[in-house]
Every structure is written in C-alpha cells, then in structure tokens.
Image (cartoon, coloured by chain):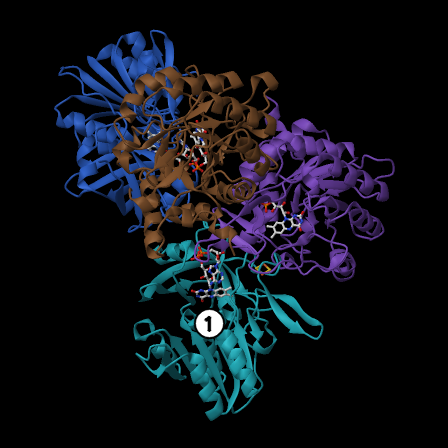
Chain colours: A cyan, B blue, C brown, D purple
Amino acid sequence: MKREYTGNIMYQEQLLEDCYRMVLKTDADLLQQALPGQFVHLRINPLGGPLLRRPFSIHSIDQEQGTLSLLYAVVGQGTRIMAADLPGKTVTLLGPLGTGFPHLPASTGEVVLVGGGLGTAPLLHTASWLQAAGRKTRVILGFPSQDRAMLASDFTQIGATVHITTEDGSEGYHGYPTSLLHKVLLRESVQAVFACGPHAMLENVAKVCGEAGIDAWISMEEKMACGIGACLGCVVRIRDEMGSHYEKACLDGPVFKASEVIFDET
Amino acid sequence: MKREYTGNIMYQEQLLEDCYRMVLKTDADLLQQALPGQFVHLRINPLGGPLLRRPFSIHSIDQEQGTLSLLYAVVGQGTRIMAADLPGKTVTLLGPLGTGFPHLPASTGEVVLVGGGLGTAPLLHTASWLQAAGRKTRVILGFPSQDRAMLASDFTQIGATVHITTEDGSEGYHGYPTSLLHKVLLRESVQAVFACGPHAMLENVAKVCGEAGIDAWISMEEKMACGIGACLGCVVRIRDEMGSHYEKACLDGPVFKASEVIFDET
Amino acid sequence: MKHKGLQVVIPGRREGARSLTLDNPVIAASGTFGSGREYGEYLDLNQLGGIAVKGLTPEPREGNPLPRIVETPMGMLNSIGLQNPGLEGFIKEEMPFLRTYETAVIANISGNTVAEFTAMATRLESVPGIHGLEVNVSCPNIHRGGEVFATNPEMVQTITEEVVKVTTLPVIVKLSPNVTDIGLIAQSAEAGGADAVSLINTVLGMAIDIKTRQPVLKRVMGGLSGPAVKPIALRQVWQVYQAVKIPIIGMGGIMTAEDALEFLMAGAAAVSVGTGNFVNPTACIDVAEGINAYMEKHGLHRVSELTGAAHKQ
Amino acid sequence: MKHKGLQVVIPGRREGARSLTLDNPVIAASGTFGSGREYGEYLDLNQLGGIAVKGLTPEPREGNPLPRIVETPMGMLNSIGLQNPGLEGFIKEEMPFLRTYETAVIANISGNTVAEFTAMATRLESVPGIHGLEVNVSCPNIHRGGEVFATNPEMVQTITEEVVKVTTLPVIVKLSPNVTDIGLIAQSAEAGGADAVSLINTVLGMAIDIKTRQPVLKRVMGGLSGPAVKPIALRQVWQVYQAVKIPIIGMGGIMTAEDALEFLMAGAAAVSVGTGNFVNPTACIDVAEGINAYMEKHGLHRVSELTGAAHKQ
Ligand SMILES: Cc1cc2nc3c(=O)[nH]c(=O)nc-3n(C[C@H](O)[C@H](O)[C@H](O)COP(=O)(O)OP(=O)(O)OC[C@H]3O[C@@H](n4cnc5c(N)ncnc54)[C@H](O)[C@@H]3O)c2cc1C
Ligand SMILES: Cc1cc2nc3c(=O)[nH]c(=O)nc-3n(C[C@H](O)[C@H](O)[C@H](O)COP(=O)(O)OP(=O)(O)OC[C@H]3O[C@@H](n4cnc5c(N)ncnc54)[C@H](O)[C@@H]3O)c2cc1C
Ligand SMILES: Cc1cc2nc3c(=O)[nH]c(=O)nc-3n(C[C@H](O)[C@H](O)[C@H](O)COP(=O)(O)O)c2cc1C
Ligand SMILES: Cc1cc2nc3c(=O)[nH]c(=O)nc-3n(C[C@H](O)[C@H](O)[C@H](O)COP(=O)(O)O)c2cc1C
Ligand code: FES
Ligand code: FES
C-alpha cells in the first residue's frame, strides 16, 4: 500500500526575494522511489488551511541525510505559509507521484535540460540522475535578469554544463532559453530535451525541438486537487490519431512528450 | 487610536500534558495598559485558519523583558496549533480588552483568589498586582488531582499564601476549592473574593460569598467573535431592578459582580 | 478614504427620492459593526464609505439565548436574534453619536409584518443623519406561517412597494442567499421600486455538538458568514447583475481588497465587510485603501469602471 | 471496517426491489474517487461502506476546458463537466475491476432528459456488481430550457417515478443544495418512490481572477465542496430528516469522524466523503474507524442509534 509520509522541515534557504529552498527530512521509502520529474503533494498545514495539497517537483534528494528538497516561489497562501515556516515544523507528503522524465536508451548524444525560472526545480534531481547514469548533461537556465538568476553552481557541482540566459542580457546569453536551445540543437549532438517552465516556454521548446527533429519531454503545471488521478481536475489535451483526448497531469504526467501536447487551452 | 499588536513567541513551557504557558514578546503599550482580569484576543494563524480570534486571559506580564504570558489548555483547533507553534512565530493581538477585577478600596482584610484548573490563568497577574499594592493575597487553586496541580510555586514566589485543593485528596485540601473558600470566609477577615474557573465553580463562589455577605467578582468565559463589543455574541445575563438584561462579556466583563450574574443559560 | 474616484452614488429612482453618496465603496455590514462606537476606537469612522447599523426592530429585542456563535471552517454561524434597543432606543442612544461623523449611515430594518417595515421607514424618514434604509427581508412573516419574506418574490415586491411609498430615503433591499433563484427575487425588489439591492445575508447553516448530541445553537439553525461563503456570494452577485439594472452592494466573506475587487468585477457597485471586522478591526479601511491602490496601479478613475468588469469579455 | 453494528441497510421500498447493504456507513462520494482504482493504492477498498462511482452519462463526455478546479477558503470549486467514458465504457473498463471487491458499488447517473435517466437505469439493471443507483438530478433539463431538474419538485418526482419503474436496484436520489426548500424536493423524491436520498451535491459558486478580470472557471460557475459547506449540508440533512421517512446519505465537507457523527446525528443513515479524499487519501477508512471508536466508547450497538439523535431532546 502507498501511504502518506511526514516531512520535517530541517532548514530553508532563501535564494531570491520570493524564492526558497526547503529541506525536509522524510522517509527512506519515499526517497528511494523518487524518479526525476516526479512530484510530491504537500499538505502544508495539517492543523489548519489551506485545504488542498500543493504539488511541488522533487528538486533534489540526499539519501544519506534522508532529505528531500523543494524549490519554490512564493505566489499565494500556501507558499506564503511555507516561507514563514520554521525548522521543526511538520508537513505531510504524498509521493513520489506522477510520471517523470523517461529513461532514455543508451546514447552518446547529450541530454539538454531547459529550465525557465522556477521551472528549474525538477531539473537538479534530473541532472544528478543523468550524471549518475553517465549521461552528458547540458543545462540551459533562463531568467529575466541577473538578479533573478540562480542555481548555476548547483548544476556545475554535479558535473553538468551550464548556460545561463537572461532576457535583458545582464548575465550569460542575451535572450530566451529557447533561442539558445535552438543554437545548441544546431551545434551539438543532442539525444533529447527535457524542459520545465512557463507554458509559453514549453510551447517554444516543443516547436524548436519539433523543427530540429529532436525528442523533447516537458513537465506541465496544472491545478491539482487529488494529485493521484481520481478527480480529473488536472487534465492536459494530448494529440492522438482520432484528434485528441485528455490525460491527467498528475498521473500520466506531469511530463509529457512535447510533440503530443496541445497547448491552446491554458 | 487602539491598534493591533504583534506578538512574537519567545518560548513555551509545557505544564501538563494538555496545558502550556506561552511567552510572547510584544509592545510596551499593551503591557503597560494591562489590568488584572483583562484578556487579549489572539489571531493564532494570520496566514491561515482558524478564522476567528481566540480570547486568553493575561496570565503574567514582565515589563522588563517586554513579555506577556498566556496559560492555556489544548481543547480544539486553535490551541492545538498554538501548542505546535515554535519560537519565532508571530501572532497578532488585540488588547488589553474587557473590564477586569475591580480596584478595591484600601482595607486590612485580605483578598482571596479562587482558581479552578485553567481558570487560574488570570489570577497570577492579579496576585502580582495585589501584592504590589501591598494587599494581603490568599490563593485557592482547585484541581482534580495532584497530577493536574500546578502553579503553586509561581504564587508563593510573589508572596501570596497558597492553598491547593484536589477533588481526590491526592494533594492539599480534599474537596472543591469552594468548600475551602467557605471555611476561609468563616475564619479570616476577607474583603473580597476574585474567582475564575468553570461555570459550576463560579456559581458556587457566588453562592458561598452571597451567604457570607462577602463581595465577589467572577470572570466569565463566553464564546466571542469580535471581542470588543460589536457583535453581541458573548452576552451574560445580569440581574437588575427590572429583572435582567444582557451585558457583553468582552466589554462589560469578563469580570462581573458575582451576585448579579444569572447562571441558568450556560 | 475620500476622493472623487472612490465615490459611489446610488441614485434615488423615485420622484423626490434622495440618493445615497458613499465616500468610498466600502460599507461596514449590518450587525457586525454595532453602531460604530467600538470599531471607532480602531479606525476613523469618517474614513468609511458607510455604516449599516445593527438590525433594528420596532420594539427592543433581547435576542437569542447563548451560545450565539459557533466557528465553522473559515466561517461562523450566528444566532444573535436581532438583539437591539428598538428603533426609538437606537435613535435616542446612537444617532447623536453617529451624527458627529460625515459617513453615510444606513439603517437596517427588520419586521415580521409589512406594517412593521413601513412604520419604521416612516419614523426614520425624519431622523437627521440617516442616509439610507436597508430593508432586511430575511425575517419570518408572522402573517404567513413564518415563511421568510426573502424567499417569496411577491412578498419582497410588496414590502419594497410599501416602504418606498413612505420614504424619500434611498431604499436598499437586502436579499437572502437561501433561495433557488436570487435573480428572480432581485427583480421583485427592482419592480417594487428599490434603489439598490444588497447581498448576501447569511446562509442558513447549523452545527451539532457530538458530546451533547444536540444542535450547538439553541435555535438550531444560524446564519453562516465569512470567507467560507464567498464563492456563493460572488455567484449570486453575478446572477443578480444579470437580472437587474439597479446597483448592487455585494458582501459575503470579504476580508481583503482582493476579495472586494472580485465582488466589484462580478457586478457590485459597492461592498460590505462583516465578519472580516471581527478578525481585523481595520478591515473596512484596509479594503478601501487596497481598492484605491489597485485603481491607481491600473489607471482607473472611477470605481464604476470595475463594476461588472468580469461580464465583459 | 466490517462488523454487524456498523452495517447500514437501505431497504428497497417497491415490490421486488433489492435493498442496499453497506458494511459500514461511509461511502466514497461520486466524482471524487474515480472508480476506486487510484485510492485503492492507499487503502483496502474492501474496507469501505460503498463506492459511488464518478458520474456517468449515456455517451462518453470530454468534460469542461481548464481550469477545472479553484481553491476557496476551506473549500474548492469544481467544473469537471462530467468527464466520463460513457455508460458502456464504464461497464467495460471499470466493472471488471470493481467486481473483484465486495464493497457496494453505486452507479451515479446523470442525464439531460428523463429518457436518458431511464435508459441508463435499464441498462444497469442487468450489470453484475452494481448494488444501487444514485440519480444525480443536478443537471440541466434540455427539454425545459436548461432548468436544473433538482430545483423543480415535479421534475424530481417524475424522474424518480420513471427510474424506479425500470429497475429493481435501490434508487437514491441525489439532491442539490441550491434550492429554497430542500425538504420539499426530498418529499418529491420520496413520493416518486425513491429508496433513499443523498445530499448535498455541490453548492453553486464562483471565483474571479482579478488579474484577468474574468471568471476563473471557463464555465463561470462551479460546484463548491469541502469543509466550507459543512454547516449548510448539516442544516439541509436536518431539514430533510424532518421532511421524509426514507433514509438519508449525508455529505458535504466531511473530513473526520467527528464531522460524520454530526451528519448522523442530524439525520443521516450513512455518509459520504468527497473532497476529504483529496486531502487525506485514507479519509473514508479513517472516518469509519472513528465512528466505530465513538460507538464503542459510548456503548452503542448500531449506527442507527445515532441517526437523528439530535432531533430528540
Ligand atoms: C506537478 C507540479 C509541480 C510543481 N512544482 C513546483 C516547484 O517545484 N516549485 C514551485 O514553486 N512551484 C511548483 N509548482 C506550482 C506550485 O504547485 C504552485 O505554485 C503552488 O501550488 C502555489 O500554491 P499557493 O498556495 O502559494 O498559491 P495559490 O495561488 O494560493 O494557490 C491556489 C491554488 O492554485 C494552485 N496553483 C497556484 N499556482 C499554480 C501553478 N503554477 N501550478 C499549479 N497549480 C497552481 C494551488 O495548488 C492551489 O490549489 C508545481 C505544480 C505542479 C502541478
Ligand atoms: C475572556 C476569556 C478568557 C479566557 N482565558 C483563557 C485562558 O487564559 N486560558 C485558556 O486555556 N482558555 C481561556 N479561555 C478559553 C479559550 O478562549 C478557549 O479555550 C479557546 O478559545 C479554545 O480555542 P480552540 O480553537 O482550541 O477550541 P475550539 O473548540 O476549536 O474553538 C471553537 C470556538 O469556540 C470558542 N471556545 C472554545 N472553548 C471556549 C471556552 N472555554 N470559552 C470561550 N470560548 C471558547 C473558541 O474561541 C472558538 O471561537 C478564555 C475565554 C474567554 C472568553
Ligand atoms: C454577528 C452577525 C450579525 C448580523 N446581523 C445582521 C443584521 O442585524 N441585519 C442584517 O441585515 N444582516 C446581519 N448580518 C449579516 C451581515 O450583514 C452580512 O450580510 C453577512 O454576514 C455576510 O457578510 P460577511 O461574510 O462579510 O460577514 C449579521 C452577520 C453577523 C455575522
Ligand atoms: C471534483 C468533484 C467531482 C464531482 N463529481 C460528481 C458527480 O459526477 N456526480 C455527483 O453526483 N456528484 C459529484 N460531486 C459531488 C460530490 O459527490 C459531493 O456531493 C460533494 O462534493 C459534497 O461533498 P464533499 O464536500 O465531501 O466533497 C463531485 C464533487 C467534486 C469535488
Ligand atoms: S489532480 Fe486529481 S486527477 Fe489529477
Ligand atoms: S465578542 Fe462581540 S460583543 Fe463580545
């Protein structure tokens, strides 16, 4: 039987004005199962509100410490409470949930990870996993400007090649991460692209990779209630032979093959 | 203008399985105004629920440390959250609210404080205040049994005479605090009685003091919404020449003259 | 908060009727703000858009036995039972105080017969300092077996017609959410000549004490208010906006300016804060300031630019 | 949870009708539990009192566009739009799985015409493993200008009469809370021959996105559920208990055994947990165990001793 786990907040790190990394001590079961691109469904305040759980990507895992980290932006009630939470507080977790990034067949081509802003969250765990599997990993991280840029060192530390892009050119490549991706795809031998970020960026990833004929998988953020496939709240429209059908972001996703996602709806 | 204050949890002390003392750092304004028997109206979780504030008596005040303490029992959602709260968390406070115990005219007679269980909460601040004013203060604290008894040393430390009563006789006087009160009233020269505790105890205090012809004031706990006299949620039935009328526990009380309270309703 | 862009005017529709001018769109909701005295210690009453005073009845009322309030998840039930000093008591005890402020005072009146409503409206017509009447139709009609006026379109229309006949004050009919089709009831108020409608009053609810196995409230049911009801209130404001042309005063669970903006966009010309005052004693002013800040940020010049905005695609 | 004291039997009222036996009084609410597969990974489906499967329509339905859910204070709005594989799809894809469990399976059916309801009931009559029908009347009637069946007593009675004619399965009519007098609607279901009523379905609500100034949900309104609505649901269960003699399945905001006990005392014979599952995937079983613990503590032998307890002084 699957079950709910508890997470004990060990510490938090403030990375930007509105962005934190929360490190949770939790059950070894959960940590061992966690695949890249999967998420946990957090009950932030078991003694009070908000009512619904909140989905967060697994940002990194430290088996030795028995910890899981989340990278989150403060956007509403739940994340505001999280940001104010003190070490020692307990949350509850369902997870690991969903279908993450695929296990790719062996190849000499590199895997390019593209993260937009907070969309970087699941990519650190993903990069560690690729590196551990001996895969060449290149990471493109897009931010609006230098003062919003983060995490480059976390990726270099685990051996990935990192590019920062900023929209205003204040750091790294001047432009969107997808335009750098476009250049990388022309230049390098790339087996696949994994991306996470705003819908507009993902749509562009799909387009750029589609044109280059490279397989891409993208992680979709939809509002979720149950997080396990029962409520039908989180559907994503997926192309098929008959036209299209809905799949569940929480169960069939959040990672989908980019070429199959129909973006119009959100 | 009155205003809302913030309270920063400094530390908590667990006195019994379900009873805690919370020490809050708060504004000097609030501390300076606080009279014995008054209360604060606490917003436990400004970022979430519960919705309504919770009233707690002012248990003690330390002007030098700039702190206020509350003594509370864990009975429901709000107090469960409080008990789990960690030092550093911020709550908000309205207060000091209500009409506390009266300023008695000078007298050689002693003032007897009667507390039932958690009803002891406001009596510590009250005893300090009486002692500071050079009044002889006797305290009768009633508990079900020895393992639920507490706070005697807090009262002796400030110079009050303390009697513990337990219902099962496991510590101190064997019986209800009101039956010991009855004996004290016969034996000592008592100017007035101040009491706080369960309704049944307060009703008995009123009876015992009425029979002995001693003035008594009692602190009533009613459910409160606004805490400042606007919602009419917290009324207490008070005897008058015409029969009776409702007064507001939050504004006209929580302390009322015992002889004027009509107890039937609650 | 006062300045031209925040002002809301509810015009009188009848010949000779006065209009209601609110300095800003935030009114303290009836029954939650007393007569303003208590909250006046926490905020400047002159900064409010208006004060709807606690519900008045012709004679003094003691109200219901305790307990009168029960907390529920992000809401509360109340069963105050219209405790009030009676219309004359109110005029004598509270109006001299209220007249010292410039803020619009709205008298909230409750009756058990049409005659009680008209008698109160007649008496208030000549009371200086009263700026408007809010007709609380969520009361049982003792001539109709206790059926609640607010649930019956004809009764709502009749009360409205009779009240507007006897007053030049602007008449706001306060609607109950406990109906199948609130648009229909709003149309009855409009047809009866109301200058505005306000909604929602509390939602009928209850709670049971599992220790005593009895209803918590002595009168069994009470009125649910607070954030829990906000989605219901917004939906009904939306429906009423599509049903009538008269202005709407929207309320139900407003705690913040963001909440209030939702009500304006759903169709409200002004809003009220009720339960929110209990949690935050400066809620009314915080909400008004937040609306003002939103308007400045988005270059809006009048509150009316927001009213009903969500109906336009 | 299984033992005699927890069992709830809803007898068939008609000649030849089957009765519905629940091992315990806790049913997973329709639309919140899929067909049990997903939650089956977190709990033993055999420990449930029953499963009301997601709402079925004659043909497959895609459901509504996104977003489909919005959180509200201690509640949520949903606008799923009855996404389902259609009756045949359900029978083929889900029933083989559900038949492997002993738990009572209740088919929740939704139609836009009386004929759609009777066609589904007829088809389900012969499907092995179906233990009861829940008739969801909170749908618009396309033959009556989209009026919601549930708001009209005659329509509710007609649907019930027609459905009971074609099935020997126990028939539960699921009532909408969005009516003035729910007792009246329950009486119509009873008069139509229903074996039980279940309530409440979701409360109509909405939310507005102040950034876009548009309703959050594409279909504007959605159904409010969760703890926020509990006081409303309890009140309606209380009212229906006073209005009819048939058993009531109570729901709306149940998260804990304490919540469920309130519903039983208000008049419910059994309860359902909906939104609570999303928060706590073992909610149904936790609630059943808590009821059991309460009964043991208080020396109660049958759940029915609690049903309606709060009505007796
Ligand atoms: C699979 C998945 C993985 C995610 N991983 C991360 C992550 O690693 N870091 C991170 O910062 N955010 C992540 N998000 C988004 C995150 O769930 C929301 O930012 C968060 O729920 C906001 O909660 P709130 O209470 O602060 O905001 P509120 O706006 O108050 O939330 C209200 C409701 O909307 C939902 N919601 C709000 N924003 C989003 C959003 N962007 N996506 C989905 N639901 C939303 C909430 O879950 C909640 O139900 C992820 C979302 C999904 C679906
Ligand atoms: C003037 C005053 C002073 C008080 N001082 C103290 C004190 O010093 N220490 C202490 O432990 N308790 C005190 N109480 C009682 C205290 O307010 C409640 O125990 C507390 O509000 C319970 O909150 P909860 O969320 O844990 O319980 P819940 O049962 O979840 O609360 C639900 C609602 O009921 C109200 N409520 C519950 N129990 C009581 C009660 N006994 N009296 C009044 N309202 C209640 C709550 O305020 C809330 O509105 C005082 C009450 C009043 C009126
Ligand atoms: C304690 C209390 C007393 C109330 N008394 C009245 C009243 O006398 N007359 C009236 O029309 N509405 C009364 N109401 C309803 C409010 O004015 C308002 O319509 C309702 O509470 C919804 O708004 P809210 O959620 O902001 O509180 C009362 C509400 C509360 C909570
Ligand atoms: C996401 C969701 C989907 C639902 N789908 C259905 C449905 O298909 N048929 C139905 O009769 N009720 C449906 N309901 C209503 C629930 O069965 C239940 O009546 C309601 O949610 C109140 O209970 P709760 O507060 O425990 O959720 C749905 C509720 C939710 C939250
Ligand atoms: S969140 Fe419930 S199905 Fe995906
Ligand atoms: S709590 Fe509102 S009047 Fe006392």
Label 1 element class:
loop
Screen quadrant of the C terminus of chain D: top right
* Residue B137 in view: yes
The chain under label 1 reads: A
* Residue C57 in view: no
Q: Name the foreground residue: A77 vs B113.
A: A77
Image: D180 above or below A128: above
Position in image of residue C238 (x %, y %): 52, 45
Rendered residue at 32%/12% (across/down): B259
How many neighbours does mark 1 have within 10 angstroms: few (below 14), some (14-19), or many (20 or more)?
many
Position in image of residue A201 (x %, y %): 47, 74
The residue labelled by disc 1 is A197
Q: Is D93 placed left or right of A131 in the picture?
A: right
Image: C242 above or below C167: below
Image: C94 above or below A261: above
Q: Name the foreground residue: B260 vs C252.
A: C252
Q: Residue furthest front?
A: C15
Image: C6 above or below B217: below
Position in image of residue D136 (x %, y %): 70, 45
Quarter holding residue A103: bottom right
How many marks overall? 1
Quarter holding residue B27: top left
Q: Of the residues shown, which amino acid type is indicated by label 1?
A: Gly
Q: Is C261 placed left or right of D31 in the picture?
A: left
Q: For the residue with label 1, is its CB less than 8 Å from the closest atom of ligand 1?
A: no
Position in image of residue B138 (x %, y %): 22, 22
Q: Name the foreground residue: A138 vs B72.
A: A138
Rendered residue at 53%/83% (across/down): A209
